[in-house]
Amino acid sequence: MRQQHTQFPRSCQRLQAAHHSAVRLFLGPRAGVTFVSTDSSLTTPYGRSSSESSETVFVFGACVRDEYQLALQFSVGGEAQVNYISLGTPDVTSSPASASSAGDVSRHLIASNVLFFFRWYY
C-alpha cells in the first residue's frame, strides 16, 4: 500500500477540502517575529563615529490558498496574503553621543502578497 504525504508551510492550515479531492482550499493565520540589529562606523578627517541600532519586527496576518493536484506528484496553486507589520521602536546608541534625539518612532504598515506555485512531490 502506497501512502502520499504532503507538507504545507505552517503559515496556512487546512480549513476544508472542496468536494473534488484534487482541489484543496486552505485558510489560516500567519505570525512572525524578526530581530534586526545594525552596526555602522564612519571615519572622517574630523574623527570616528559609530552607531548601533536594534529593533523587533512583528508580523500578523491571514492567508488563503487553493491548490489543484494535477497528478500524484504534481500540483499547481495560488496563495493570497494580507499582513499587518509593526516595525517597532529602534533602540539607537551613538558614539560620540549625539545631542539630537529622534524621540519615539512608531512604524506600522499593511502589506499584501500573491504567490503562484507549481509543486513536485517525490
Image (tube, rainbow, N blue to C red):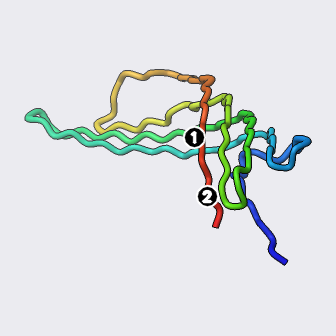
Callout 1 secondary element: strand
Q: Nearer the viewer, residue 44 or 118?
A: 118
Q: Residue at x 42, y 23 (%)?
A: 101
Q: Quadrant of the N terminus?
A: bottom right
User: Compared to 121, does 107 lie above or below?
Assistant: above
Q: Position of residue 86 (x, y in %)?
A: 62, 30
Q: Residue furthest left?
A: 45
**Circle 2 residue:** 120
| N-terminal label among 1 and 2 | 1
- Give the spatial CA distance, label 1 vs label 2: 36 Å
What amino acid is labelled 1 in the image? Thr
Q: Position of residue 47 (x, y in %)?
A: 15, 37
What amino acid is labelled 2 in the image? Trp
In the picture provided, is 4 more to the left or to the right than 84? right
- Residue 20 appears in which quarter of the rendering? top right
Q: Position of residue 87 (x, y in %)?
A: 57, 31
Q: Residue at x 39, y 43 (%)?
A: 38
Q: Residue at x 57, y 40 (%)?
A: 56
Instruction: Mark 1: give few (<14), some (14-19) or many (20+) Cα within 10 Å.
Output: some
Q: Residue furthest front?
A: 71
In the picture provided, is 83 more to the left or to the right than 16? left
**Circle 1 residue:** 56
Q: Nearer the viewer, residue 21 or 26?
A: 21
